[in-house]
Structure formats: C-alpha cells, structure tokens
Image (cartoon, rainbow, N blue to C red):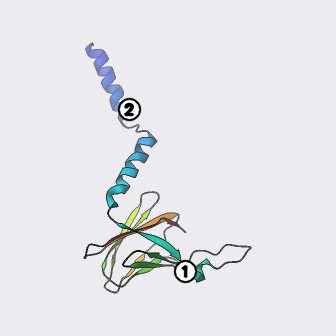
C-alpha cells in the first residue's frame, strides 16, 4: 500500500468517525440502562380518584403511586412541578430520567418529600437510592 492510499484511508476513517449509526447509539443507551439492574422495580398503581374520568374525555393522571416491596413513592402532578413522598419516610436521593436521556436529581428530605421543577413532559421514570442501600426504579410513565 502506498503512502498516498494509506493517508486517503486514514482521512476517510477520521471523517467517518463522527458518523455513528443510530442503531449503535441506541444499543449504547440500552446497555447504559443496565447500570441499575440491581434496583427493585416499583410498579405503578393508579389512585382511584386519578383514574376516574368521563366517556367524552379521559382523565389526566394527577396522582399516582409506585409500589415496591418495602416502600412506595407517591407522586402528584401540580401546575408547575412533580412533587412526591417516599413512604415510609426516609431520606435519600431521587433522579428523574426522561425517555430522551435527560436526568435531574434532587434530595429527598427526612420526611420523604421531594419536588422536581419544571414539570417533566413526555415519558419519565424515577430512581431512588437511600443511605440504607435501597434502590428503587419505577416503571415508565407519560404525562
């Protein structure tokens, strides 16, 4: 192989390095999602008042609970925030993760309260970790 052809191939490789196929990116995001594989999955249980609606128009999901084995995460949607409480109360750190990959974290105080502002749009899930080692990952939910 001549020097010119080698330089040409190296140049092509450098130009192509920025063009990562979307399928590779999706695989990378999926692999990254496994970093919480040890977290307990909390399932969504809709509060009866939130599920009530009319035939003409479905009710908006305003209050719901994610139930895990030893605790639950109660969440309420307000005009400008997502507020919630860990029950039974315990401090910790909770992350809001969107389907687009955005993450926002906040502290959970000693009575279990937390808030995320601004209100998330689209698909999201919560990931709670506490000082005692509890890790809870909720199901995906869409507002």
Numbered mark located on residue 87 in the image? none
Q: Tell me if 124 is positioned left or right of 134 in this view.
A: right
Residue 101 quadrant:
bottom left
Which quadrant of the structure image shows residue 89? Answer: bottom left
Toward the top, the furthest residue is 2
Which residue is at a point 34% across and 60% down the rendered structure image? Answer: 37
Residue at the image position 61 percent from the left and 74 percent from the top: 60
Give SS at disc 1: loop
Residue 35 screen position, x and y as percent: 32, 57
Residue farthest to the front? Answer: 69
Q: Residue 9 at what x, y percent from top left?
A: 33, 22
Q: Which mark sits nearer the N-terminus, 2 or 1?
A: 2
Q: Nearer the viewer, mark 2 or mark 1?
A: 1
Query: Can you say whether 48 is above or below 94 in the image?
Result: below
Q: Quadrant of the N terminus?
A: top left
Q: Quadrant of residue 18?
A: top left
Q: Name, please, the residue furthest toward the right.
A: 56
Q: Where is residue 85? Give x, y as percent.
A: 41, 82
Task: Give the image location of residue 10, x and y in percent.
Answer: 30, 25
Within 10 Å of disc 2 (Cα), the crowding (few <14, some 14-19, many 20+) is few
Instruction: Give the structural element (helix, strand or loop) at label 2.
Output: helix
Q: Which residue is mark 1?
A: 47
Report the residue at 36% width, 26% height from top: 12
The number of numbered discs placed on residues in the rendered structure image is 2
Asked whether the residues under the numbered discs 2 and 1 touch, taking CB atoms below 8 Å apart as contact, a structural biologist would say no
Which quarter of the rendering shows the C terminus? bottom right
Task: Return the residue nearer the eye: 139 or 105.
Answer: 139
Q: Nearer the viewer, residue 108 or 68?
A: 68
Disc 2 from disc 1: Cα separation? 51 Å
10 Å crowding of disc 1: few (<14), some (14-19), many (20+)? some
User: Which numbered circle lies on residue 16?
Assistant: 2
């Amino acid at each position: 192989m001549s020097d010119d052809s080698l330089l040409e191939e190296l140049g092509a490789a450098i130009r192509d390095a920025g063009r990562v196929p979307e399928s590779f990116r999706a695989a990378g995001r999926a692999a990254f999602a496994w970093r919480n594989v040890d977290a307990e999955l909390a399932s969504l249980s809709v509060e009866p008042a939130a599920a009530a609606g009319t035939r003409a128009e479905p009710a908006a999901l305003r209050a719901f609970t994610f139930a895990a084995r030893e605790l639950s995460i109660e969440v309420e949607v307000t005009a400008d925030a997502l507020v919630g409480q860990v029950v039974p109360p315990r401090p910790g750190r909770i992350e809001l993760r969107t389907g687009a990959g955005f993450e926002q974290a906040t502290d959970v105080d000693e009575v279990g309260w937390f808030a995320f502002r601004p209100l998330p749009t689209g698909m999201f899930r919560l990931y709670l970790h506490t000082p005692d080692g509890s890790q809870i990952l909720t199901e995906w939910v869409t507002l």
